Amino acid sequence: MFDVGFWEFALIGVITLIIVGPERMPGIARAAGKYVGKAKQFIAKIQDDVSGELEVDKLKDHLNVMDKESNIIDIFDEAKDSINDIKKDVGDKQS
């Protein structure tokens, strides 16, 4: 994303040291580190959410394909045949 190397960070550090002074520098570095950590967590959460949404979309597409392949009328017919077979078996055993 950003191409920031060692020398860029060193330059930012020197400029910050000159502007704020050595007394306030550790506090500012701590606060900057805290904000960078929060930003990284925020970005990681967004990436996880996007990945999850992509997986959900893939699953929905897969289920739609499966629904198109299986005809609901065929499933009902198979269920009716199974029930009729069970009824016939129960009737044969009672006789």
Image (cartoon, rainbow, N blue to C red):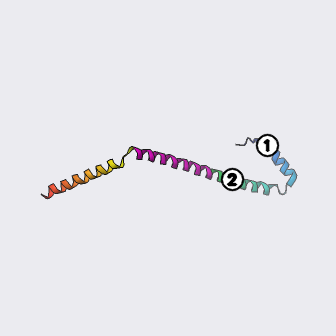
Q: Residue at x 73, y 53 (%)?
A: 33
Residue nearer the viewer, 53 or 39: 53
* Mark 1 secondary-structure assignment: helix
- The amino acid pointed to by label 2 is Ala
Q: Seen in the image, is 29 located left or right of residue 86?
A: right
* Residue 64, percent from left and from top: 45, 47
Give the residue number, with chain letter if any, for mark 1.
8
User: Which residue: 85% across, 48% down?
Assistant: 15
Q: Secondary structure at mark 2?
A: helix
Task: Name the residue at 15% across, 55% down.
Answer: 92
Q: Position of residue 63 (x, y in %)?
A: 44, 47
User: Residue 19: x and y, percent?
Assistant: 87, 52
Q: Which residues are magenta?
A: 45-68
Mark 2 neighbour class, 10 Å CA radius: few under 14, some 14 to 19, many 20 or more: few
Q: Is residue 21 visible?
A: no
Q: Is residue 34 left or right of residue 48?
A: right
Q: Which residue is mark 2?
A: 39
- Let me know if residue 60 appears in the view: yes
Between residues 43 and 70, which one lies in front from this camera angle? Answer: 70
The amino acid marked with disc number 1 is Glu
Q: Quadrant of residue 1?
A: top right
Whether residue 51 is in magenta: the answer is yes
